[in-house]
Amino acid sequence: MPCGLLYYVHIPKTGGSTVFNRLKGITGWGFNRLYWGDDRNEEDKWVKHRDRWMKSPGWEWLEEQLKLQEPRLIVEAHHGAPGLRHMEQHALKKIACQLKVKGCQLRIVTMLREPTARLMSGLVFNTAYDSGIPEEESALRFISENSELQSRYLLEGHPRQWRNELWGKLPSPHSVDEDLVESVQQTLAHAYLVGHSAELDSFVYAIYRLLGLRHRKATRLLGHHDDDSNVTPQYNRSALSVEIRTAAHTATQSDRKMYESWFTGAERPQPFTEMCRHGPGPPGWKLVGGPGVTECPEGQKKADHYECLVAVREAVPKVTFEGVKRVNKGPQAGIPLGCIYSKPSNSAVFNAHVGPPGVPHNDNYQLVCSNT
């Protein structure tokens, strides 16, 4: 990603404050927030006037920075930002096409968390106060008002921004809202990275690499951030009543189905889809392979080591790649040189061997080549 916009959707209690701190101050990349802040009066104004985000300092900054020839921008979308579905339809697609003309890209990233754990974290953080154990009535009200929050946040933002009155009530037991799940999957099809809060460092590392940081610098930056931010205090789950635990399970039925579709299989539930599919732009990537193929076709180039992760993700959009395995395999291995997709291990590999390339006997190891 040589230039463009990284749009990070910060879902509450997924480790987002820690990610926020790690994305600030990256050399060469400007940073701002689409967020109503901690002032309750300002929050009320954003709720009353749904387009207030367009007049916010963060959005006005973004619009000004996008006028640059090669903008390098990071925006965190948090409370007050319209849901990602709305932003994709009404703002981000236009930005994606504007950036494409400049040879830049728009990349949406977000992070999910196991839904019941995320809800319980929010419950304790917002209602337990000094005791460590939430009061029963307050807890049950909070659970109802925040049901299926992870999915609904992606569609419509903070609960105060939801328009569907039924979303503020506890769902029926043993029911999954299939329309909700499908809407979220269609929205996340435009997300380039969907991380897992249990693997936060891997998610941030993938962002660093996407932004063009080399492995050594990305690793060094991760090492400079030891403390997690805005962490929920420890609590005794067994001390929570059966009613609270049952309600939390009921309130996350659709969220769990959506979440599990991302992290229980080798492939994404929806392949990554660019929002802007027309006009000029940076080269796309595709797989090239077969018996005897050791080079990209004439006029096309191999992805180098620093492009490899981005290139292989674009060439194989159904697979979630966490990183690139670097190897040094000579001709006897039958593996081409450079960035390749390994079918046997379903992984991205960079063969850094210097010398004659291996000559593949099949298409198990395919080169990642530019489309143009």
Image (spheres, rainbow, N blue to C red):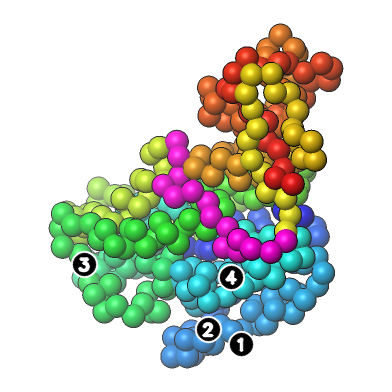
| Residue 64: quarter of image | bottom right
Inter-mark Cα distance, 1 to 2? 16 Å
In the rendered structure, which disc, 4 or 1, sits on the residue that comes first in sequence?
1
The image's mark for residue 92 is 4
Secondary structure beneath dot 1 equals helix
As drawn, is 332 to the left or to the right of 228? right
Magenta: main secondary structure: loop
Q: CA distance from mark 2 to mark 4?
A: 27 Å
Q: What's the residue at 50%, 72% (across, down)?
A: 89
Q: Is residue 132 above or below residue 332?
A: below
Type of amino acid at the residue the image marks with label 4: Leu
- The residue at 77%/55% (across/down) is 2
Give me the disc on residue 154.
none
Name the residue rendered at 52%, 87% in the picture: 51
Between disc 2 and disc 4, whose residue precedes? 2
Q: Position of residue 355 (x, y in %)?
A: 84, 17
Question: Looking at the rendered structure, which numbered label has been put on residue 170?
Answer: 3
Q: Three-letter amino acid code at disc 2?
A: Asp
| Mark 3 to mark 2 CA distance (whole Å) | 29 Å
Q: Nearer the viewer, mark 2 or mark 4?
A: 4
Quick one: which residue is furthest to the right in this view? 355
Amino acid type indicated by mark 1: Lys
Which region is colored magenta? 266-280
- The residue type indicated by label 3 comes to Leu
For residue 203, above or below residue 246 = above
What label does residue 39 carry, if any?
2
Residue 271 in the image, given as x and y percentages of width and height: 49, 48
Mark 1 vs mark 3: give the one in front.
Answer: 1
Q: Residue at x 72, y 61 (%)?
A: 280
Q: Which mark is residue 55?
A: 1
